[in-house]
């Protein structure tokens, strides 16, 4: 009887710990440049960051940029991990390019920007085989007369706000 109670308590504790990490979402950071050609044939560039990407979707100060580990999509989520918008979605076949000089996995993917349902970009993804959650993705997306280039990096598992539990 005592063993059964210990097993139940252990199971509940493991369930609580598992619930604190939102499944398959990994915190992400984006930096890049937007290059556009104005009507007068003047090329302009502007830097952007995660904050700029999030502001295109919501005015919420608690929204986060994440990578969905199951789909590879870059997403904006609320503090509880609820999807607000896809930013980029991987489409097409992932092609393994090979390991880099540090034996990291390297893949090339096609991207669709903000759910336009067209392939309008590509990315090269490097995933560290030695460090969980560490990945970087360099990308180039052409949309609406603008070219967005940059880098997405990941850090740690997304944890929802304690008020969401």
Image (cartoon, rainbow, N blue to C red):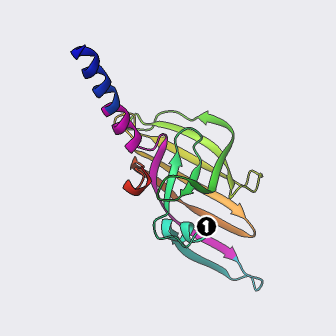
Residue pointed to by mark 1: 57
Image coordinates of residue 3 in percent, x first then y, are 24, 15
Q: Is residue 60 above or below residue 92?
A: below
Q: Residue at x 34, y 38 (%)?
A: 17
Is residue 8 at all visible to an observer of this figure? yes
For the N terminus, the quadrant is top left
Span of residues in magenta: 13-36
Q: Give 113 or 162, whichever is nearer the viewer.
A: 162
Q: Is residue 1 above or below residue 150?
A: above
Q: Residue at x 66, y 59 (%)?
A: 141
Q: Is residue 153 above or below residue 108?
A: below
Mark 1 lies on a secondary structure that is loop
Q: Is residue 134 left or right of residue 57?
A: left
Is residue 131 at all visible to an observer of this figure? no
Image coordinates of residue 115 in percent, x first then y, are 71, 55
Q: Is residue 159 left or right of residue 60?
A: left
Q: Give 57 or 129, whichever is nearer the viewer.
A: 57
Q: Give 79 or 123, whichever is nearer the viewer.
A: 79
Image coordinates of residue 163 in percent, x first then y, are 40, 57
Crowd rating for badge 1 (residues with CA inside 10 Å; few <14, some 14–19, many 20+):
some
50 in magenta = no
Image coordinates of residue 64 in percent, x first then y, are 48, 60
Q: In which quarter of the view is residue 144 placed?
A: bottom right
Q: Residue at x 52, y 41 (%)?
A: 69
Q: Is residue 123 left or right of residue 9?
A: right
Q: Residue at x 49, y 69 (%)?
A: 51
Q: Is residue 8 above or below residue 164?
A: above
């Amino acid at each position: 009887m005592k063993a059964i109670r210990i097993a139940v308590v252990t199971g509940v504790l493991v369930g609580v710990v598992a619930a604190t990490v939102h499944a398959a979402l990994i915190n992400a950071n984006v930096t890049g440049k937007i290059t556009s050609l104005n009507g007068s044939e003047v090329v302009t560039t502007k830097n952007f960051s995660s904050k700029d990407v999030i502001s295109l979707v919501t005015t919420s100060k608690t929204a986060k940029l994440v990578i969905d580990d199951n789909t590879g999509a870059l997403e904006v989520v609320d503090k509880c991990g609820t999807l607000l918008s896809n930013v980029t979605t991987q489409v097409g076949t992932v092609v393994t390019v090979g390991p880099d000089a540090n034996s990291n996995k390297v893949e090339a993917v096609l991207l669709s920007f903000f759910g336009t349902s067209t392939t309008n970009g590509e990315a090269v993804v490097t995933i560290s085989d030695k460090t969980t959650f560490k990945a970087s993705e360099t990308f180039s997306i052409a949309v609406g007369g603008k070219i967005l280039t940059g880098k997405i990096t990941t850090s740690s598992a997304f944890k929802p706000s304690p008020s969401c539990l």
